[in-house]
Amino acid sequence: MTVNLNGARVLLTGATGGIGHAIARALRARGAELILTGRRTDVLEELAAEVDGTVIAADLADAVAVTDLMAKAGDIDVLIANAALPGVGLLTDFTETQVDRALDINLRAPIILSRWATEQMVPRGRGHIVLIGSIAGRAASPQTSMYNATKFGLRGFALAHRDDLHGTGVGVSIVEPGFVSDAGMFVESGMELPKGARTVSPEDVARVVVRSIDKDLGEVMVAPIEIKVLSGLSLVAPRVNSAIQRRLGAADIIAGHSGDEKR
């Protein structure tokens, strides 16, 4: 059973970023009632005024804050777990605290929120969970081991949880953007895109999120065809993917980033 977004209560995490803004606007255009969460209250309140939403500030790295968020949000029809940290750099560049923070925000919080949403959706026989993954959940890249770890984990969780909920009326989708213009991991970490790489827009991602709910889609990539082909190759031939990335100088591109988003 698909969810009618008109009047549906939607909890959107990571609402302060460009992709979050685009998703919020797309959902509001369909009549959804939005609960927006993130750490930057000023940005959230400005967006909430635009989309007539409710703000609940929360740091998803804090387990207590996640519990508080669930209590304040109440009953929802749709969960969209969009919040994530880029996690760029060698593993030895990260402190244990930074490793924990990446795991908590990118993987633990979406799983805990999905568990909470599932418990209230299944008895009603309807609802939808959308997890915003990444092409990085299908193809590993140099110096993104932490980001790859969380996005590979999120993909595995999403696909298995979708199977677990088959026949309940509750859907699970994982939406996997490639390079996103003016938003996403590469922009937030300060890196330049590989030469010649094509991008998608935050609005492209938002349209796929809405379509995933409307059509109860399982796994959807939002990327140009060449990125989709390479990500598919990486699943069946990871060594070939590694060789291609070395040839393209991916490590040098990523090593030259100026961001400090491993907080």
Image (cartoon, helix red, strand yellow):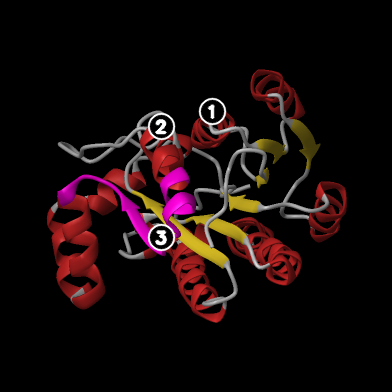
The residue wearing badge 3 is 217
Disc assigned to residue 245? none
Q: Is residue 164 left or right of residue 263?
A: left
Quarter of the image for residue 12 reads top right
Does the magenta-highlighted stretch encompass residue 259?
no
Which amino acid does the dot numbered 1 rest on?
A: Ala
Q: Give the image location of residue 9, x and y in percent.
A: 70, 44
The residue wearing badge 2 is 203
Does the magenta-highlighted stretch encompass residue 213?
yes
Image height check: is 94 above or below 28? Answer: below
Residue displayed at 67% across by 61% down: 104
Which amino acid does the dot numbered 2 rest on?
A: Glu
Give the alpha-carbon distance from disc 2 to disc 3, as whole Å: 18 Å
The residue wearing badge 1 is 29
Q: Quadrant of the N terminus?
A: bottom right
**Disc 3 crowd, CA 10 A, few/some/many (<14, 14-19, 20+):** some
**Disc 2 crowd, CA 10 A, few/some/many (<14, 14-19, 20+):** some
Give the alpha-carbon distance from disc 3 to disc 1, as whole Å: 20 Å
Residue displayed at 14% across by 71% down: 240
Give the alpha-carbon distance from disc 2 to disc 1, as whole Å: 12 Å
Q: Give the image location of residue 191, x and y in percent.
A: 37, 37
In this rendering, the label closer to the viewer, 2 or 3? 3
- What range of the chain is rendered magenta? 210-225
Residue displayed at 69% across by 36% down: 33
**Which element is circle 1 on?**
helix
